[in-house]
Each structure stands twice: as structure tokens, then as C-alpha cells.
Image (cartoon, rainbow, N blue to C red):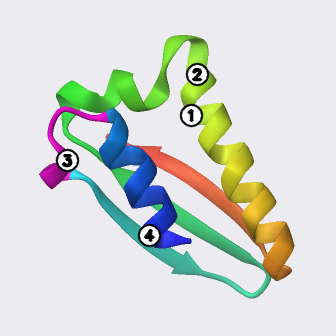
């Protein structure tokens, strides 16, 4: 799952070397924290948050398949 988030984010940004994903594991929920360069933040979020919403939908669907609730947070 972590690799999936990294690949999606690196495809969107200008500075792929600044993309990092950390995973916070819980009992039933896993939180993935995505960090990108400040200049690439808008590209990951997209117009009116559409890109971020699409990424969250993919992560949520993938998590359902493995039986866990997955949440994506985009950090500055």
C-alpha cells in the first residue's frame, strides 16, 4: 500500500525525490502520511481537492480488500 501511494505521488510532482510516505499502524485503521515539497502540494491536492479525493478513494478501496480501514493524510 505504501508503494502504491509513493508511485501515485511521484507521478504527480515535479520533485519526486522529496516524496515520503510514513505508515502509522493501528488496530483496525492504518494512517498513511504523505509528505511532498511545499511547491508540489497543490499538484497533489488538485483543483478543489479532486486529486486528493481520488487518491483517498483508491487507498480506501485497497484497504477494504485486505480488511483494514486505510486513511491518507497529506501533510505540509
- Mark 4 and mark 1 in contact (Cβ < 8 Å)? no
Q: Which label sits in the foreground, 2 or 4?
A: 4
Identify the residue under disc 4: 3
Residue located at (74% from left, 65% from top): 62
- Mark 2 and mark 1 in contact (Cβ < 8 Å)? yes
**Drawn side of residue 69 relative to residue 16, left or right:** right
Q: Which mark is residue 52?
A: 1
Instruction: State which tag comes first along the sequence, 3 or 4.
Output: 4
**Drawn side of residue 38 relative to residue 51, left or right:** left
Q: Which mark is residue 49?
A: 2
Within the image, what quadrant is residue 31 found in?
A: bottom right
Identify the residue under disc 3: 16
Task: Measure how far apart labels 1 and 3 are at the Cα level.
Answer: 17 Å
Task: Measure how far apart labels 2 and 4 are at the Cα level.
Answer: 22 Å
Tell me where the magenta segment starts and ends, as one range: 13-18
Instruction: State which tag comes first along the sequence, 1 or 3.
Output: 3
- Mark 2 and mark 3 in contact (Cβ < 8 Å)? no
Amino acid at each position: 500500500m505504501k508503494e502504491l501511494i509513493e508511485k501515485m505521488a511521484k507521478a504527480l510532482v515535479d520533485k519526486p525525490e522529496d516524496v515520503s510516505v510514513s505508515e502509522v499502524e493501528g488496530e483496525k485503521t492504518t494512517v498513511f502520511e504523505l509528505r511532498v515539497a511545499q511547491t508540489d502540494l497543490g499538484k497533489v491536492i488538485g483543483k478543489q481537492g479532486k486529486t486528493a479525493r481520488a487518491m483517498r478513494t483508491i487507498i480506501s478501496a485497497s484497504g477494504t480488500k485486505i480488511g483494514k480501514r486505510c486513511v491518507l493524510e497529506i501533510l505540509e
